[in-house]
């Protein structure tokens, strides 16, 4: 048995999770994007039809996800790195997973910085940004070191309260919505909508990274159920929130709002006595934030360990956390981070998430025919 095989077995025999926990992790990793700056990135290009962008992006990426599930069914006891190495060879598979690593690292840097900006700008204006960043990262490192089973359990146990919080926010927005703001229905036109949808496919790209965990499910026969439930629900969540923000603020006013979810919960109120109800949503949103980025940090540690053949990936979380803070503090403001770095990441990563699964599936199909 080689060192790589030992590393693989030690990694994939430590924790086992159920399909419900797996679905919850997907909802936190992807669905939480509806409450950050993700919707803001789509308004300038698609205008009133911006809610169609995440819908079409979801539909397009659904094809590679389905193809990867077909490959996993053919190799049920192997994870993606082993499958890619078997099909493409070690040099190509290592290069592909290095790209996964870089994309995931840049994503967690830009996204954590974005959330720190939200917390500092909207709620704790007098707190130094670095202090908020350090406290957030300490929570993430602590959670990641607890292991996958603990992360998945927390995700499942807190999911109900997060869903109730988000549904409550949507219900409170309804009296303020104006349906006429959805028009013109196709915004700047079909071509622009399709182009923006292709640019933003990587909004859902986390699903391909989380598929690395499929061999860890207790019941491998039900991993499809957990993946599809989490993926579809996350897509619905992002589309609905993006649509509600359009109906609430209209275009082009929405273009000037960087944090539409937080501005919305500040805008709505219950009667004339219950104002500032954002304080009711903040604790649950913070919990969702910590769970989401703990999942990100754990997956980043796995990718780093696989690419550089580090067996004890648990020791990577703390140095990775320091590196994330150091690089995350470089952008001068949230505008540079969100509209320059994150937008470019989404655009350049989208073709990667679209084409790599197709490459693996085509190679698997070709080798299968050659073997037969």
Image (cartoon, rainbow, N blue to C red):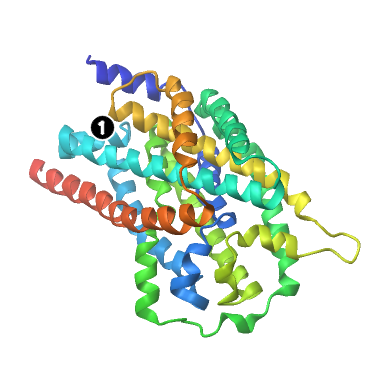
Q: Is residue 309 above or below residue 361?
A: above
**Residue found at the far left of this picture:** 370
Whether residue 299 is visible to the viewer of this picture, yes or no, is yes
Q: Nearer the viewer, residue 197 or 1?
A: 197
> In percent of the image, x 44 and y 29: which residue is there?
320
Q: Nearer the viewer, residue 321 or 361?
A: 321
In the rendered structure, the answer to whether residue 227 lies left or right of residue 35 reads left
> In percent of the image, x 74 and y 60: which residue is there?
266
Based on the displayed image, in which of its 4 quarters is residue 236 positioned? bottom right
| Callout 1 crowding tier (Cα within 10 Å): few <14, some 14–19, many ≥20 | some
> In percent of the image, x 30 and y 32: which residue is there?
78
Whether residue 219 is visible to the viewer of this picture, yes or no, is no
Q: Position of residue 89 (x, y in %)?
A: 15, 35
Q: Nearer the viewer, residue 5 or 30?
A: 30
Q: Position of residue 234 (x, y in %)?
A: 52, 54
Query: Which corner quadrant holds the C terminus?
Result: top left
Q: Position of residue 348 (x, y in %)?
A: 31, 55
In the rendered structure, the answer to whether residue 206 lies left or right of residue 273 reads left
Query: Which corner quadrant holds the N terminus?
Result: top left
**Residue found at the far front of this picture:** 332
Based on the displayed image, in which of its 4 quarters is residue 210 positioned? top left
Q: Nearer the viewer, residue 365 or 212?
A: 212
SS at circle 1 = helix
The residue that mark 1 highlights is 82
> In percent of the image, x 41 and y 29: which residue is there?
301
How many numbered dots are placed on residues in this image? 1
Q: Position of residue 194 (x, y in %)?
A: 36, 72
């Amino acid at each position: 048995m080689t060192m790589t095989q030992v590393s693989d077995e030690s990694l994939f025999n430590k924790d086992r999770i159920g399909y419900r926990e797996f679905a919850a992790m997907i909802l936190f990793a992807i669905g939480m994007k509806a409450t950050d700056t993700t919707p803001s990135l789509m308004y300038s290009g698609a205008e009133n039809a911006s809610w169609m962008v995440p819908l079409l992006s979801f539909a397009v990426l659904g094809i590679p996800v389905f193809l990867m599930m077909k490959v996993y069914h053919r190799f049920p006891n192997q994870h993606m790195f082993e499958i890619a190495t078997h099909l493409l060879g070690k040099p190509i598979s290592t290069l592909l997973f290095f790209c996964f690593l870089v994309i995931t690292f840049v994503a967690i840097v830009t996204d954590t910085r974005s959330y720190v900006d939200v917390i500092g700008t909207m709620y704790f204006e007098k707190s130094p940004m670095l202090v908020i960043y350090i406290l957030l990262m300490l929570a993430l490192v602590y959670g990641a070191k607890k292991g996958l089973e603990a992360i998945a359990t927390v995700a499942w146990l807190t999911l109900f309260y997060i869903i109730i919080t988000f549904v409550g926010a949507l219900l409170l927005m309804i009296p303020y919505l104006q349906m006429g703001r959805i028009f013109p229905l196709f915004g700047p036109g079909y071509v622009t909508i399709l182009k923006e949808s292709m640019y933003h496919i990587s909004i859902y790209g986390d699903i391909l990274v989380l598929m690395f965990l499929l061999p860890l499910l207790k019941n491998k026969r039900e991993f499809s159920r957990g993946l599809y439930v989490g993926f579809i629900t996350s897509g619905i969540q992002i589309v609905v929130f993006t649509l509600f923000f359009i109906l609430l603020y209209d275009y082009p006013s929405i273009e000037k709002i960087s944090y539409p979810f937080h501005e919305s919960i500040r805008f709505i109120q219950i009667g004339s006595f219950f104002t500032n109800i954002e304080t009711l949503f903040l604790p649950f949103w913070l919990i969702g934030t910590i769970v989401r980025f703990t999942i990100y940090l754990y997956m980043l540690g796995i990718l780093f360990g696989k690419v550089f053949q580090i067996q004890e990936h648990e020791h990577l979380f703390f140095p990775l956390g320091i590196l994330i803070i150091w690089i995350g503090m470089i952008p001068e403001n949230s505008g540079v981070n969100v509209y320059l770095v994150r937008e470019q990441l989404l655009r350049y990563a989208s073709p990667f998430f679209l084409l790599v699964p197709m490459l693996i599936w085509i190679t698997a199909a070709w080798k299968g025919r050659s073997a037969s």
